[in-house]
Image: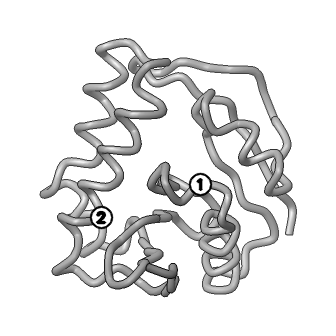
Amino acid sequence: MKEQFTFKELEMDRLQEALTLIRKVFLEYEAPDYSDEGIQEFMRFVEDDAMKRMLTESKIHIWTCEDNNKIVGTLGARPDHINLLFVDGRYHRKGIAKQLIRIMIEHFSPSAVTVNSSPYAVEVYRKLGFVNTDTEQTVNGLRYIPMKRKI
């Protein structure tokens, strides 16, 4: 079946589907680089009630990419910072992350966007115009490299 990507804001009744994708992709691609502490910290961040509360309080904004009504990519962000960018592995290298970032930038109009990239995603962010702003850091078991892209 041909891919028919649709990009839109996350509908609250689809939060569980989006979080399931985020957890799956995290466990497959990023968790192998993390300690148990880091994995637990990430899972607390994307816990259903915590994420619902952040969305309700506008502390995070989430967009999705759907293929034939199935969520295959997500981007969660504050006005100038990406918190969650996850794309199903079967959909890597199809421009989904690039399009989600473009939508986020159009929505918020920041002068720059930052991200604390996992070691796995650094090359992806570099290809999307981000540069390292510091060396790798670890907080609560989460390894990340601070990065920035000027708009």
The residue shown at (13%, 57%) is 49
Residue 127: horizontal and vertical position, in percent? 82, 50
The residue shown at (86%, 69%) is 151
In the rendered image, which quarter is residue 109 located in? bottom right
Looking at the figure, which quarter contains the N terminus? bottom left
The residue shown at (32%, 25%) is 39
What secondary structure is marked by label 2? helix
- Foreground residue, 80 or 3? 3
Q: Is residue 26 above or below residue 108?
A: above
Q: Which mark is residue 119?
A: none
Quote the CA–CA distance across marks 1 and 2: 16 Å
Q: Is residue 122 left or right of residue 141?
A: right
Of callouts 1 and 2, the N-terminal one: 2
The residue shown at (39%, 34%) is 28
- Foreground residue, 134 or 69? 69
Assess disc 2: are there few (<14), some (14-19) or many (≥20) residues with their C-alpha within 10 Å of its C-alpha: many
